[in-house]
Amino acid sequence: MEQTEHVPVSYLENEAGLVRLMDDWGDRLLRLCALYLRDAHLAEDAVQETLLRAWQAAGRFRGESSETTWITRIAVNVCKSYLRSPWKRRRAPAEELDALLAPPDRPQVDDTLPRAIMALSRPYREVILLYYYQELKVREIAEALNISVPTVTARLSRARAKLRESLKGWYYDA
């Protein structure tokens, strides 16, 4: 189900709202958290924590941003918190991450691009994931990451240049 912008989150005020939140956002958040954390199990935990935090904070959502920006910001903060925690600094085997991210009804495809994205440093990886995979606008990324719009634009530009260089001969013409 595609999320709409500036939807009031008053529907989250009861347990049925939590179920709807999981249905609307679960898969999308799982992909974001898995890519961000590089660990399928941590990603599942992060999604649960994100959904719980969003549900608990629904009454404080003022609608100054879209629901997409709001919940993405919560997820990014949860992921950053997980990455700062020393006991949670572990990596999932590549096969496990691939299985989590691959749609179940499609055959396995070339993973060169996702691996190149995951090899980027976190600031560049963040903006690429949010822009291309979460389909957020530059302004929404700036709000979600609490950085300026020019910073997002610069990071996107640098990330694309790094990807172009690392993918030379694979995707981009040499």
Image (cartoon, rainbow, N blue to C red):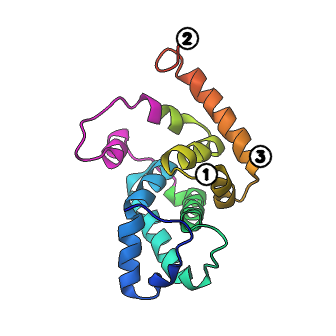
Taking the view exactly as shown, the residue that stands out farthest to the top is 174
Residue that label 3 marks: 150
Front residue of 47/72: it is 72
Q: Is residue 24 left or right of residue 143?
A: left
Q: Does the stretch in magenta take in 165?
A: no
**Chain part drawn in magenta:** 89-114
Residue at the farthest bottom position = 14
Q: Amino acid at mark 2?
A: Ala
Tags 2 and 1 touching, CB below 8 Å: no
User: Is residue 90 something that shows in the picture?
Assistant: yes
Assess whether residue 103 is covered by the magenta stretch.
yes
- Please tell me whether mark 3 sits on a helix, a strand or a loop: helix
Q: Rate crowding at label 2 as few (under 14), some (14 to 19) or many (20 or more) other CA atoms within 10 Å.
A: few
**Residue hosting label 1:** 137
Q: Tell me which amino acid carries mark 3.
A: Pro
Q: Secondary structure at mark 1?
A: loop
Of tags 1 and 3, the one toward the viewer is 1
Res. 174 mark = 2
